[in-house]
Structures are given as C-alpha cells and as structure tokens.
Amino acid sequence: MSASPRPLRVGLIGVGWGSVVQTPAFRMVPGFELAALCSRRKESVEQAGQKLGIDDISTDWKTFVERDDLDVISICTPVDLHHEQTLAAIAAGKHVLVEKPVGLDTAQTAEMLAAAEAAGVCHAVCFESRWEPARYAVRELIRSGHLGTTYLVSARSGADFWHPTRGIQSEWMYRTADGGGYLMGMGSHDIEFVCSMFGEPAAVCADVRTSVPERTRADGTTLAVDADDTSVVLLRMADGTLVTILTTAIALEQNFRTFEAFGSAGSVTIDGLLMGEREPDIRTGTAGVAGLHEFGVTPRLPASGIEAPKRRAAPAITALALMLEDWLPSFSGGESSAPSLFDGHRVQRIVDAARRSSAGAGWVSL
C-alpha cells in the first residue's frame, strides 16, 4: 500500500485575520499543515505563535518565502504589501493563497496573475463567502439551470461601520491608496459571486462615494477619508444579464445581505444578515408553479469532520476550510473551483472601471 502524500506545509504571513480565520481553516483540512508564522512585528508574531501552538516564527518575510521546507505561502497582510510579497513567493516557486483585495489596482493584479501562470504554481484568493451554506446552495441551483435565461441579478450588503456615530476602524481602511474602501473590502465578494455564475462582464457603470470625508479621532485630530463608504455598481454581463451591486457602510442601525436573481424559468432570493446568527431565508419561484417556496439547505461540512471553533468567526472559518478543500485538487493537476488570481484580477478590473465610471467616464467597456 502506498503511503499517503504528506500535507502541504503552509507559511502564513500576517497574524491578524490569519490567526482568527485562516489558521483554524487550514487545520480543518488535513491536506494542509500550517507550519510557520511571519509578521513584521516581533511581539505580534510571538503572541500569535504562543496562542496557536506554533514555535516556528519569523519577522523577515523576504527570507520566509524562500524557505525550502514551505510549499504554500498564505498572504494575509495589509493590501499594499500583497503585490510585492506575492511576486516574491512565486519567484521562489511557492504556491500562493492571497487574501482579498488582491492588490491596489489592475496593474498589480495583472502582474501577479501573469507571474503565477508563467511559474506554473497553484494560486487562490480568499473569496470564501461563495462557500457559505446559502450562497453555495444557490450557486449550485443557478448553475443547474433553474433560472433559464437570466434577466436581472441584484446583490445588496450594508451595515453602519463608517456611520459618524461609530468609532474609527483601522486607519488604512479609509485611504484608497492603501487598498481601503468598502467596494474593495465588502462589495468584492458580491462581484466575485456574481461572476462565478454569470461569467464575464462587458461593461460597468457606477457611483462610488465617500459620504463622510472626515472623521475625528479619539484625540481630537482629524482623519481625512478618500476611500468609499457607499457604491452602486451596474454590470452588463456578456450573456446579457443586468447586475446591480449595492454596498454601504453608513446604513445606520442596519445589517443586511441579500441576493436576488430573476430569469425566464425561475427566480431565487436570499434574505440574510451581514452580521448575525440568523440563517438566511432562501425562496425560489418556478415558471408554471404558483407562489414562492422555501428552499431548504443542508450545509456542506468539511470532509475531515473537524468543526470550527465556537466563536463569531466560525461561519467564515468553515467557508474558508471548504474553499481550501476544493483547492486541493490543483496540487495534483486536477480541476479546482477555488477562486484564483484570475478571479481576483477580474474583480479588480471591475472595481477600477467602477471608479473611472464614477469619476465621469460613464459606461466603461471591459
């Protein structure tokens, strides 16, 4: 009997979201072994290592990505570091997992994709929300032909994270040059979800706004804001589908995440929360059958049977674990449904086009 292949050894750069979500997700998929941590702040990586039980830590990412004993580099750092770190990891022959947003602009994401393809390494991007139970089930339903010819699709996500009554988040998030803004941070999930079902967009028209251009820090000083808190994006898909994507972080006392799709043969809606414990409601309509009907979902669980830690991030952890599970076939030359740098680049092309449109370009062809 042949021995089982050894797990892919993962080196994680960035111990914020990386500790909270990526680490437990990797540990739910036996095909991966989270072996080492890296962060530019020694105190942060030491604390993370102690908490996670990982002794192999580093503060030098440039030598970290070149280590012979690591197979995969997971990049979970601030957005403005993704481009340089990803290219360095690829140049060292490593497979890469990159948090979204992938880069600061289309030029960066195009270079990252081209480098990965030229090197022949496996690459994926953390658009794990596609594996949330409701979205996973609805995507499978739509891909089975439930809608027939698709007419209209709408996705809405909102909360009050940046409402003036709320405190300030990490300051880089308020600067476009650092990869901030909610079109990149939240709307990108909806963009990727739509494209995963309906393919390539042909043109983009958008209004991308900074509704609150200044925030007051706790010490009384002023933080200038140029990143978006609200956006409405229209997509004309190549197959003729019209898509609207609304994203806002200034919806006072609101918390919503919805999806609707309408076609010649059927319709489907997801009515859920961006944050909260309630499971989304899914309803479907079918041509020739009166009324809307509840659509039950049996959540897919990781094949390992390992459960996510019981905390608020558990749904995101499980979704990422499922994405990682579906990425594994790539490493043996198989097909994978995991979002890749191609998908990340496509999302960035749409984001950049939306910004150009909002600045006065009108409909922007892609």
Image (spheres, rainbow, N blue to C red):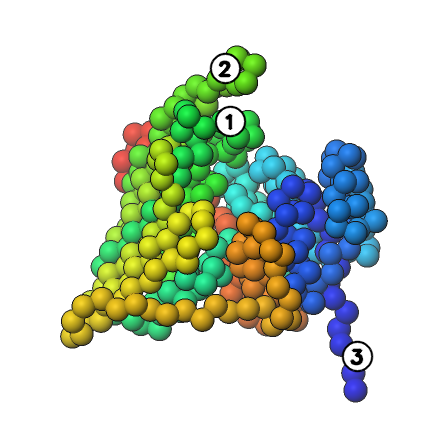
Q: Is residue 152 left or right of residue 185?
A: left
The residue furthest bottom is 1
Q: Nearer the viewer, mark 3 or mark 2?
A: 2
What residue is shown at x 74% (from left), y 61% (from top)?
A: 33
The residue furthest top is 220
Q: Amino acid at mark 2?
A: Thr
Neighbour tally class for label 3: few under 14, some 14-19, many 20 plus, Cα within 10 Å: few
Q: Tag 3, which secondary structure?
A: loop
Neighbour tally class for label 1: few under 14, some 14-19, many 20 plus, Cα within 10 Å: some
Residue 205 in view of the camera = yes
Image x and y of residue 218, in percent: 54, 18
Image quarter for residue 267?
A: bottom left
Q: CA distance from mark 3 to mark 1?
A: 52 Å
Q: Amino acid at mark 1?
A: Ile
Image x and y of residue 178, in percent: 55, 31
Q: Amino acid at mark 3?
A: Ala
Picture disc at residue 50: none
Residue 202 in view of the camera = no
Picture disc at residue 168: 1
Image x and y of residue 196, in percent: 42, 59
Q: Nearer the viewer, mark 3 or mark 1?
A: 1
The residue under label 2 is 222
Nearest to N terminus: mark 3 or mark 1? 3
Q: CA distance from mark 2 to mark 1?
A: 11 Å
Image quarter for residue 293?
A: bottom left
What residue is shown at x 56% (from left), y 30% (from top)?
A: 170
Are dots 3 and 2 in contact, CB under 8 Å? no
The residue under label 3 is 3
Q: Is residue 265 above or below residue 56?
A: below
